[in-house]
Image (cartoon, grey):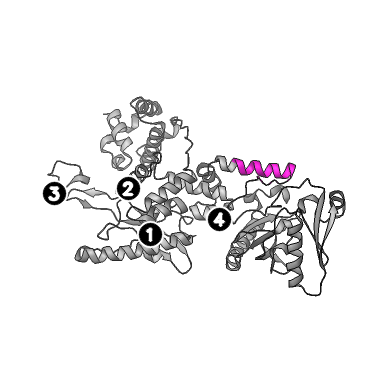
Amino acid sequence: MAEVSACPWRLRRYRVAVYHHLIPSLGAHRLAKLEPEHLERLYRKMQANGSSAGTAHQAHRTVKTALNEAVRRRHLTINPASIAKAPKVDEEEVEPYTLEEIQRLLVEATKARNTARWVIALALGLRQGEVLGLKWEDVDFETGVILVRRGRLRPRYEHGCGDKCGRKAGYCPQKINVRRETKDTKTRAGKRSIGVPDQLLALLRQHKAEQERERVLARDLWVEKGYVFTSPTGEALNPNTDFHRWKDLLKSAKVRDGRLHDARHTAATVLLILGVPEAIVDRIMGWEPGKSARMRRRYQHVTGQVLQQTAAKVGGLLWGPSSSSVVPASGHAAPNPSRSSTPAEPTVYVALLGDRRIPFLHHEHAAAVASQWGADHPGEPAKVEEWDREKWDHEGPGGPRAIRDQMPDRRVVHHAYAVYLPGGYRLNVGRAERLSALAWEFEPDLFTDLPVRWHTARRSGQEVEAQVRGTDEDAVSAAFGDACTEAVDRARNPGNYGDLDAC
């Protein structure tokens, strides 16, 4: 039986923690004598010597994998690591960067080389390897989409001097990288397309122009590999160097220290604050469907802003909406029922527009609407009447919630709507898929002044509806596709959206 330190399944290939702690601890013990108690003692020793519980747990997982190979090759009959009690890990809650901290980082990033690299990390939450593995062929400027399909690998070096320099391989003056630069994403979910904000697309165009200037300056030294983010000579960026640039950015922006991976936590939390649907979050972050719920719990952190929005929604439901309510900044939220608080004044000024009644708190607002609506609809009655509050509460459509305390926006609001049956089949409800109207001609619960906002909802039956509305017609058209995609998925997989009780 071979000694552990020379076993053919190469424990040394695994993590440094195993190599430095397991091999010396076992000494001359043979595999056949390895007991679960030995491993548990090792984990305790690692933690006593200063290793974290997470490092000890990683060592346990690595040893278990290595000894599984020993079992497969019949050097062992039972894997002792499967019996040994794994170190307990108390996962620390990551504190994502605040909006103010993100803005300070973005401002400071404009002063650094490869500015767009840090904007992608904070805005889209791509992993370090995914960003460094991006090539220009993956960026579609016309559609505004980035395709993630590979990751940058950390270099692995060997001596080029015949191990004569007396240094580690990574510091050898003649070191040779024996590892390929990139590999495909590990999972199908990891290979994904992500929509890019216009501001980031502009930065990428600027970055491409700057890279062209660097290519001219480097001349014969330039190595063309097609990467988006490169060294001044076109080589792929080293992940270790990239990590140190992140630390430099935090210091120059005077932002608290954190891991580079914390930028990914921050991006995921921003999606939570914006109310982006879970299916879209999973696609942006590259999470597999079977693991997405666990990953959202790990990466999306309940910040003060999330708590405030939740409190505002509860308050609006129980006591009615108020002007101080927190309004989500997303284009992916359910419509806000009303924009103003219920007035306590006894008089309501009602603009009578044809057969519609629009109530206002101020006479000048009602008069302006009647005048403008009358000009748009010649020959139809348009006037203002004064109602007492009690009469409006009993006779007015919508009651006190419909009363507006400000002048409505005159811009056109575009609307798109679809309904799907279980299984994802489209239901024709005899209603136009799309319509447009002046903002004040919408009922209060359909009003929006955002370029686009959309949501899906399950009806009291089993149908799922997709609704999109906004002032930007092109944005509404684009968002309608996303809304319908989620509605179909929601109709087919109600359990993924917490809809089982409604079925």
Write down the quadrant of residue 415 in the picture.
Answer: bottom right
Residue 228 percent across, percent down from the top left: 35, 61
Give the side of residue 108 with respect to residue 414, left or right.
Answer: left
Closer to viewer: mark 3 or mark 1: 1
Q: Magenta stretch?
A: 307-324
Which mark sits nearer the N-terminus, 3 or 1? 1
Check disc 1 and report the residue beneath it.
134
Q: Indicate the amino acid at tag 1.
A: Leu
Q: Is residue 39 above or below residue 309?
A: above
| Helix, strand or loop for disc 2 | helix
Check disc 4 and report the residue beneath it.
280
The residue nearer to you, when weighing 21 against 263, is 263
Quick check: marks 4 and 1 in contact, CB under 8 Å? Answer: no
Q: Tag 2: Cα neighbours inside 10 Å, few (<14), some, or many (≥20)?
A: some
Separation of residues labelled 4 and 1 (CA atoms): 21 Å
| Helix, strand or loop for disc 1 | loop
Check disc 2 and report the residue beneath it.
245
Q: Indicate the amino acid at tag 2.
A: Arg
Write down the quadrant of residue 248 in the picture.
Answer: top left
| Helix, strand or loop for disc 3 | loop
